[in-house]
Amino acid sequence: MAPSSSSGLTFKLHPLVIVNISDHYTRVKTQLNPPPSVCATENASSNNGEAMLQPNPRVYGCVIGVQRGRTVEIFNSFELLFDPSTETLDRSFLEKKQELYKKVFPDFYVLGWYSTGSDAEESDMLIHKALMDINESPVYVLLNPAINHAQKDLPVTIYESELHVIDGIPQLIFAHTSYTIETVEAERISVDHVAHLKPSDGGSAATQLAAHLTGIHSAIKMLNSRIRVLHQYLAAMEKGDIPCENSLLRQVSSLLRRLPAMESERFHDNFLMEYNDKLLVTYLAMITNCTSTMNEMVDKFNIAYDRNARRGGRTAFM
């Protein structure tokens, strides 16, 4: 078991990080281990026999946030590509993602990385050391995806790296540290929404989604069959095969009047007006974005020109 950290730092973890890691792990596991129905379909179309299911995969990513004095606050995370043959991260992909996030969140920095598993492994230290050129003391967030109903705490552990002398040799080891959950209003709303989506009957979320989609499919199928019966009945009434019922025709006419008039001239005018409004809003948004970019470039040019003017003294007045 890893020792406790003695750095004295205070860690604050936001729920968005836990949701991102859990979503990353669920997607990768579903891709490697498709549902039984998909496996049965693939086995039926191939001659490979039994499906080769992958064990629980490990996912990797970076955690970003800010550090104010002795307080480290982890706000968000993003995924990374891992090469299992060399046990290294795709560095070019990491730098590209870091650059993109820097544009959106200029105050956030790479604080460390995350992975999944029951405990920190020896190979994790290689990844940890590889990130020290970005952050000299990165943190390691580990999520345990195994379900333990007896556990009341969150299955998340945060590790720091400390230099200990073992058998006369200085070595870096993982030391787990305590943390608190910090939330903002938007995160509380999102977490509450996700909690309400949790099945109450003990079934999985995939089972609940399948039942919901099956209900929608059954309703659409029933509506299609009813419309087909009504159409056949009206066609037979038009041919004279069955007697005409004015009460039924009035009901059908009232039902059809509720449908939108797709072929009317008024509908086309309203549709084109709405479409042009959307295009105009999009055009204005593009102009606003270009104007903002131009203002930033002008500000940077003025700053650079002002610095050059200060270094060279007076400049020629143009």
Image: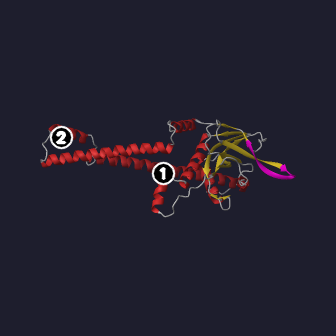
Q: Which mark is residue 300?
A: none
Residue mark closest to the camera, 2 vs 1: 2
Q: Dot 2: what SS?
A: helix
The percent coordinates of residue 309 (x first, y second) are: 68, 54
- Identify the image quadrant of the C terminus: bottom right
Residue 85 occupies which quadrant of the picture? Answer: bottom right
Q: Which residue sits at x=82%, y=48%? A: 164
Residue 298 appearing in the image: no
The question of residue 59 being in magenta is answered with no
Quick check: can you spot residue 285? yes
Residue 117: image location, x then y, percent: 66, 48
Q: What residue type is labelled 1?
A: Met
Q: Is residue 310 left or right of residue 105?
A: right
Relative to 150, is 232 above or below? below
* Residue located at (45% from left, 48% from top): 284
Q: Residue at the front extreme?
A: 49
Crowding near pointer 1: few (<14 within 10 Å), some, many (20+)?
Answer: few
- The residue labelled by disc 1 is 286
Main secondary structure type of the part rendered in magenta = strand
Q: Of helix, strand and loop, which one carries label 1?
A: helix
* Closer-to-camera residue (112/208): 208
Q: Can you give x and y, in whole percent of width and height, for residue 57 in the image?
A: 61, 53
Cα gap from disc 2 to disc 1, whole angstroms? 52 Å
Relative to 160, is 301 on the left or the right?
left
Of 195 and 275, nearer the camera is 195
Q: Which mark is residue 249?
A: 2
Which quadrant, please, contains the N terminus? top right
